[in-house]
Image (cartoon, coloured by chain):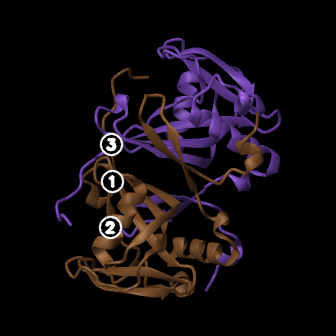
Chain colours: A brown, B purple
Amino acid sequence: PSRLPGFATHQVGVAGAVLDEATGKVLVVQDKNKTKNAWKFPGGLSDPGENIGNTAVREVFEETGIQSEFQSLLSIRQQHNHPGAFGKSDMYIICRLKPLSFDINFCRQECLRCEWMDVAELARTNHTTPITSRVAKLLLYGHREGFDKIDLAVKEIPAVYKGLFYQLYHKELPETYENIC
Amino acid sequence: PSRLPGFATHQVGVAGAVLDEATGKVLVVQDKNKTKNAWKFPGGLSDPGENIGNTAVREVFEETGIQSEFQSLLSIRQQHNHPGAFGKSDMYIICRLKPLSFDINFCRQECLRCEWMDVAELARTNHTTPITSRVAKLLLYGHREGFDKIDLAVKEIPAVYKGLFYQLYHKELPETYENIC
């Protein structure tokens, strides 16, 4: 294997699926500059040094005016040769967020439409992208049978390098395994 | 929000946790050039355009001589300002692999030691990194109670852009939700 140092090869995009547990409605947008009017979750590229959850919350606010809070990581997509990625590979991460506000005030430069849609309707409609449809089905499953079925929880862990922390995402670990010794 | 195109901000590293279900043993290495002799999973950086699972299988083979097959994605770590990442952010993904061969022939340039270790022992030992210890506990949970408890399955989906496919990773979706209409 090569002993040369690595270099940045990926851009990281993050989408936020803001689900209101009380009503089963999820926040969706239609992009302005796309050929097909498909409902999708708001999102965008991570700024350098920005945590995944913070990107999701920031992009949701910028696009829709909705304030939200990070809950979990739901899904990861890897794609190569994506037209928007300029030859780089693309990691796209979908997070589950909890709404802290409900009045939509969406960005007219980015979005054509924005609404709270029933998650069961989003899971069924053809007016969406394949990834949004799949994540909607996952959200519906979680909403009906418990979010522990679909969530990757986050755990903050001290790094080997002093003073640094990192976020580790995986399925919740039961306490009996967490405290094994 | 900025309308400028994005650029590559992350390097993506992948580790392979090769677990032999029959024996409960997992493949671990000790790096040669690190200060602390800690057991960890073999792994390394994704080549440009390389799928996550392929990186894991390739790196495991290069470091240990063990052939393996991708099973699932277990965990994701995001870290900023990592000393080895030259100011870039670092995404580190841990996959679960199934061994196809068992005779270790490890790379003496990269590794000091390499062995099949009982996963319960790895979950308990202090001679490891925090991330390895946590993933070992997760593996032990999966091995005892079913890998569906810990696995993110992969699904290949056609992209909006013709002829392209991408890999989407998330918790297995029950058929009743998969086929909702």
Numbered disc 2: secondary structure: helix
Q: Which residue is mark 1?
A: A81
Q: Is residue B20 left or right of residue B74?
A: right
> Label 3 vs label 2: CA separation?
22 Å
Q: Quadrant of the C terminus of chain B?
A: bottom right
Q: Position of residue A106 (x, y in %)?
A: 28, 82
The residue depicted at 32 percent of the width and 67 percent of the height is: A59
Residue B76 in the image: x percent, y percent? 52, 47
**First along the sequence among labels 2 and 1:** 2
Query: Chain under label 3?
Result: A
N-term mark: 3 or 1: 3
Mark 1: give few (<14), some (14-19) or many (20+) Cα within 10 Å.
some
Of badges 3 and 2, nearer the viewer stands 2
Quick one: B172 or B165, which is closer to the camera? B172
Disc 3 to disc 2: CB gap under 8 Å: no
Q: Is residue B3 above or below residue B134?
A: below
* Disc 2 from disc 1: Cα separation: 24 Å
**Residue at image mark 2:** A59
Q: Is residue B99 visible?
A: no
Q: Which mark is residue B9?
A: none
